[in-house]
Image: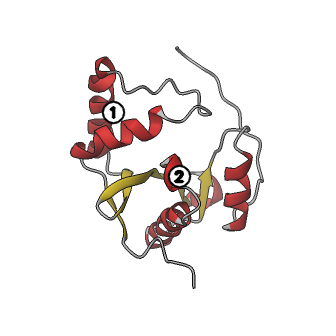
Amino acid sequence: MAKDHTASLAIRLAQRADLEALIEIFAADDVGGHGDTNNPDALPAYQAAFDRIAANPFDTLYVAELDGVVVGTFQMTLGTSLASRGASYLTIGAVQTRADKRGLGIGAEMMRYAIERGREAGAMSIKLTSNNDRGDAHRFYKRLGFKQSHAGFKMKLRD
């Protein structure tokens, strides 16, 4: 029988003390092109971003812990649109699982958790974007029931 790798998985709100682990996860991502780095000079920018997220009642940043070690993260933003008669929607972003822990079901558990939080919040739908180069992630999201229904566009405003 296969071992249940997620038996000791816990998903909780991120704390400022988690920043080092989160920065390591993002800095190890060579596909995103977000310029994440574990250079100590960047720490104030990460701290300021964490504080802005924590202060926004519509933003939540989560971590997934396996045996007490941060192994994944995702962020959720609850929005409301005038379209669709004022429906709320959940945006999920910054979804990452530590590279050495992929394939253990951690990402699926994080997404199930996010979907349930969206339902509890009364969201009509969930939106997420994924880099075009992330074929494995796209197959993962499709397995979870997400559909590729829109084209996304991006414009950089600064480097």
Q: Which residue is the extreme one toward the front?
A: 1
Q: Please determine whether, in this image, residue 52 is positioned above or below residue 13.
A: above
Residue 24 position, x and y percent, is 39, 37
Count of marks overlaid on the render:
2
Q: Earlier in the sequence, mark 2 or mark 1?
A: 1
Front one among 74 and 76:
74
Report x, y in % for residue 129: 64, 45
Describe the element under mark 2 as helix, strand or loop. Answer: strand
Q: Is residue 111 above or below residue 73?
A: below
Asked whether, in this view, residue 37 is left or right of residue 84, the answer is left
Quadrant for the N terminus in the image? bottom right
- In the orientation shown, which residue stands out farthest toward the left? 17
Single out the residue that lies furthest toward the top: 159
Residue carrying label 2:
92
Say left or right for 147 vs 2: right
The amino acid sitting under disc 2 is Ile
Q: CA distance from mark 2 to mark 1?
A: 17 Å
Read off the residue under disc 1: 49
Circle 1: is it few (<14), some (14-19), or many (20+) Cα within 10 Å? few
Dot 1: element: helix
The residue sitting at 70% across, 32% down in the picture is: 153
In the rendered view, would you say 24 is above or below 123? Answer: above
Q: What amino acid is labelled 1 in the image?
A: Ala
Tag shown at residue 2: none
Q: Is residue 95 visible?
A: no
Say few, some or many: other residues with alpha carbon within 10 Å of mark 2 (under 14 / 14 to 19 / 20 or more).
Answer: many
* Picture coordinates of residue 150, whole percent (x, y): 76, 47
Quarter occupied by residue 44? top left
